[in-house]
Image (cartoon, grey):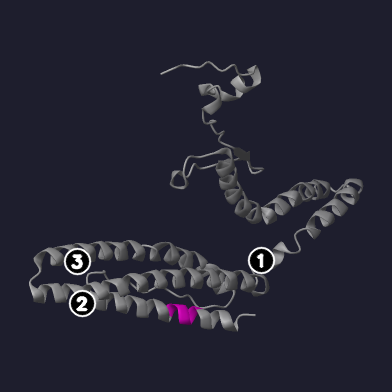
Amino acid sequence: MTRIDINLSSQLQQQLALPHCAELRLPKPKLPQIRLPTGGSIKAIADLTRGIPSDCSLNVNIALQLAPIMASIECLVKVLALVKPLIDVVKALNPPDLKSLAQAVPDFLEAAKGLAGCLLVPTPLAMIPFVKDILQLIIAMLRCLIGQMRSILGKLAGLELKIASARASGNTDVLASLECARENFKQAMDSTMMGIEPIAVLLELAGPFMGIAGVDPIALPAMAGADELAAVEQNLAALQQVVDALQAVVDVLP
């Protein structure tokens, strides 16, 4: 075969050249952390279930952690801001120092203004919207769980008909395959039913807040295993009753 050399410009040769390994190497992400004003710190968690961690995914992760922390310490920060002027007032009273007291009391009253909204936290007025939102979240989670369980139940019911047909016809190969599929679906049902645990924990944690809002506690029923279709149907009926009860509560809350 004849070889023909073609002269290429240096610019084109540079574009066609293979890149160096360093240029192709994946950048190592930095683990971000945020120092909290309370003295601790939070760090991003690498979620390997979402692929190779990157700076973007780690920053999103720490942002998801930060939002609830900032919301939860807002009143705490305001209370701590009240401590110093309160100490100054107490010092001015013992022994009495009218000049220092005249300076400390206005600072204390100004810091106390920021606590006005926080003082309503343990009252039904502030607690009802919070409880209503929590119950709506729990209802949504339960409906997702029920939907997944019904989907698997429908597939199991269809498999039972096919298994009965294969058994009646004596088709052992098809029967073995269908029984294997049934076991996999039962395992999927058991795994899906594990989703009830975090919902139960959330309901339990919400109990004190529900009490302040005047809402009676609601517990989730015990779940039977997925060995029998009838047991799964009972689980679905029990969960639906809980959803209906929670929705009735939400509907009457302002």
Label 3 sits on a secondary structure element that is: helix
Q: Quick one: label 2 or label 3, which is nearer the N terminus?
A: 2
Q: Position of residue 141 (x, y in %)?
A: 47, 68
Residue 178 badge: 3
Residue shown at 18% from the left, 65% from the top: 179
Q: Are marks 2 and 3 in contact (CB under 8 Å)?
A: no
Residue shown at 26% from the left, 75% from the top: 158
Quadrant housing residue 118 = bottom right
Can residue 43 be seen at all in this image of the molecule? no
Q: Which residue is mark 1?
A: 121
Residue shown at 53% from the left, 31% from the top: 28
Q: Tag 2: residue type? A: Leu
Q: Position of residue 69 (x, y in %)?
A: 61, 51
Which residues fall within the magenta stretch? 242-246
Label 2 sits on a secondary structure element that is: helix
Local packing at callout 1 (Cα closer than 10 Å; few below 14, some 14-19, many 20+) is some
Q: Tag 3: residue type? A: Leu
Q: Is 250 or 6 nearer to us in this picture?
A: 6
Residue shown at 59% from the left, 20% from the top: 13
Quadrant housing residue 198 = bottom left
Q: CA distance from mark 1 to mark 2?
A: 56 Å
Residue 58 badge: none
Q: Quick one: label 3 or label 1, which is nearer the N terminus?
A: 1
Is 239 positioned to the left or the right of 93 in the image? Answer: left
Can residue 158 be seen at all in this image of the molecule? yes
Quadrant housing residue 189 = bottom left
Q: Position of residue 230 (x, y in %)?
A: 25, 78
Q: Position of residue 220 (x, y in %)?
A: 40, 73
Q: CA distance from mark 2 to mark 3?
A: 10 Å
